[in-house]
Image (cartoon, helix red, strand yellow):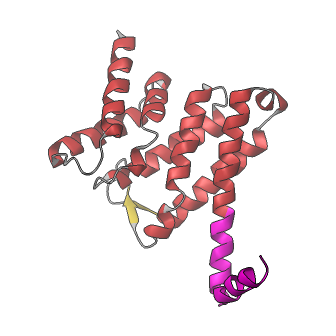
Amino acid sequence: MMDVKVNSLATLYKLFCTLRSEVPLPINYLTIMIKMIFNSLTSKLPQVINITIQYTNSIFTLDYRGLLVLIPPYIKQIKKILTVNIESPDIVKSSAITILGSLIAFPNHYREYKIPLLENPGEFISMEKVQDDIYEILSEFLKRANPKVLSDNSGLRIINKAICCATIIIYQEAIKEITKSQFNITVIYNTSIEFP
């Protein structure tokens, strides 16, 4: 019976994550979907959590109102998958890193936004905290990468994805520092024209 429920969730999540914002989704359906994903992410059953991570890995690329409230439960489960339950299936780890990758730019776009916590009404989490959590998860995951993981092709792909995400974060931080120090970006542009 559990397999039927898990397969149903997988199908539903695949359908939801293939929709695009051009297709208007009634707010009551969107609310039900957000609640269902939240319940799946806070489930005690690892199969449900794994299926949710695996089949909703593009959720934050969708342009639907209200999805940001799902960031804290995703971060919490991804942290467990990548740093605590290191024995999770590779497809789930890969999907978890894909989700982190899609969240990397959010703190820049929603800098002042505070995300309400569904599990603790009235409490919020800042986008700065989300960025710190993403960095911490990637750092911890890469520290734990062992030769057994590296010898496997899918393990190498997962680690490659994590390194790409970490590189983007480092690049974003470097750009912030350049901007803070009022570095004239046109100097770089002019120099690159002079020296092909």
- The residue positioned 62% from the left and 77% from the top of the image is 176
What residue is shown at x 35% (from left), y 49% (from top)?
62
Q: Is residue 171 magenta?
A: yes
Q: Classify 85 as above or below 182.
A: above
Magenta-span inclusion, residue 131: no
Residue 30: % across, % down: 23, 44
Magenta segment range?
170-196
Name the residue nearer the viewer: 31 or 156: 156
Along the horizontal axis of the image, is 106 left or right of 25?
Answer: right
Q: Nearer the viewer, residue 186 or 36?
A: 186
Name the residue at the top extreme. 1
Q: Position of residue 73 (x, y in %)?
A: 44, 45
Quadrant (top left, top right, bottom left, bottom right) of the N terminus? top left
**Residue 145 horizontal/vertical position (percent):** 77, 37
Q: Is residue 183 in view?
A: no
Residue 31 visible in the snapshot: yes
For the point 45% across and 27% down, the residue is 51
Task: Quadrant for residue 112, please give it.
Answer: bottom left
Q: Which residue lies at the image location 39% right of the left edge and 48% below the top edge?
A: 70
The vertical placement of 30 against 148, above or below, is below
Total marks shown come to 0
Position above or below: 32 against 72: above
Question: In which quarter of the view is residue 15 placed?
Answer: top left
Q: Position of residue 140 (x, y in %)?
A: 71, 46
Q: Is residue 185 left or right of residue 148?
A: left
Relative to 129, does residue 55 appear above or below in the rendering? above
The secondary structure that dominates the magenta segment is helix
**Quadrant position of the C terminus in the picture:** bottom right
* Furthest-right residue in this view: 147
